[in-house]
Amino acid sequence: MSTPPAAPDIREVPEAHLGRALDLASLVFHESYDKEERDRYRRLLRRCDRLGAYADGQLVGLLAAHRLRLSVPGGQLPCAGLTFVCVAPTHRRRGVLSSMLAQLWRDCAAQGRPLAALWASEAAIYGRQGFGAATHLTTLEIDSTRPLALRLTPDPGPLRLLDAAQAPDLLGPRYEASRSRRAGRPARDRLWWREQVLPEEDEDDDELGPPRIVMSGQDPCTGYAIYRTRGGDDNDNNNTPGLVEVQELESDSAPVAAALWSYLAAIDLTGRVRAWGRPADDPLPLISADRDQVRITRQFPALWLRLVDVRAALTARAWAEPVDLVLEVRDEAVPSNDGRFRLTAGPDGARDGNRYEPTTDPADLVLDVRDLAACYLGGTGLWPLAQAGLVTENTPGAARRLDAALRTELLPFTHDEF
């Protein structure tokens, strides 16, 4: 009778093993990294917390986590931003990922990080690990073969082009202002701006040009757009027009946004503008005078959130309405989250103190931690989940009351991939 293999040892991945880590990632993600990419990913992994699964001295699992500060309603919280999560094909379905995540949850508790987040390539896996889709994006496309028709007058102020090196100083304050209004956005330092937001090449499309930046306003910046372009092809049968790929657009008002969109739609030798990831409540479709010219072509989940410490997460955020409910939360991976708790919170919570305490009172709502995470930033409703049978409402109206308390002025938005 064969002996079952020993469980891998979960421990920190030292810098000396970063080459092994990249070899594993290359194998699992079916990538071939050139020297420049390996150097970039080494720099990225050096800034992350790193956990590895070792079997017989070999690295068979990897999990890295950015040390993020994520905007939440009313403030920001420390967050582990998961990246480079992979398991060798020889060790799949052996609990390697669960073991690495279990160690990460212990590390998060020790470090005071109540949140974890990732961009999920395999949603089914991470849903089982307690992650819920907390932000959603839309892809917008503009037919720019003709002038952009809008229902309001664009801001008449001048626009100017910037060098990428100027971005942190000139665009940073506008980005920070957007973080204070929309949950789900990570803080950025200079290195994040340079390597995550403005790398010289687009890793998903090597035909796109370098990043371009256009800014509205002088001091302070009232809005900006980051974009790349790809020339058209007059030699193919379809006469493919040039493309403007919008990677980020921020503004302090609708007229400024209109000016930036108008600029992007008027770039010479292009016939299409595509913004792959915009907020679900982006106003561009509303201000468009021709809905055949501006189309929503895709909607998809973006940031998947995990409440590592439910109590810390719920008591730290701002609330739109008073709420007093008993929640029965199911969380098999983090026992301290699992159980019945009374949530008492409201708009004055920052002053009077939001509370989330164990109780033996009957539960108003019974839900999985993944569904609570999906609703935490205000982008998903409890009531639709209850209607779908994913949340049990023992007290009529409880789901709608919690939805009203969780509501935010703007939908959460995450654009930064990591």
Image (tube, grey):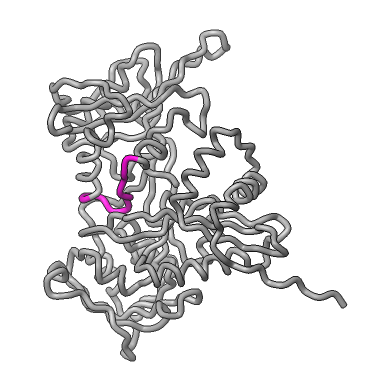
Left or right: 114 in relation to 175:
right
- Majority secondary structure of magenta residues: loop
Task: Residue 181: say if magenta.
Answer: yes
Which x, y percent locates residue 333? 50, 74
Q: Is residue 83 above or below residue 399?
A: above
Residue at x-position 51% and y-position 29%: 205
Closer to the camera in the image, 16 or 63: 16
Task: Residue 385: say if magenta.
Answer: no
Q: Which residues are magenta?
A: 180-190
Residue 387 is at least partly visible in this image: no
Left or right: 352 in relation to 262:
left
Left or right: 255 in relation to 196:
left
Which x, y percent locates residue 372? 37, 68
Which x, y percent locates residue 330? 44, 77
Closer to the camera in the image, 414 or 85: 85
In the current view of this chain or complex, which residue is farthest to the front? 16
Residue 227 location, quadrant: top left
Residue 340 location, quadrant: bottom left
In the current view of this chain or complex, which residue is farthest to the bottom? 360
Closer to the camera in the image, 279 or 337: 337
Q: How many marks?
A: 0
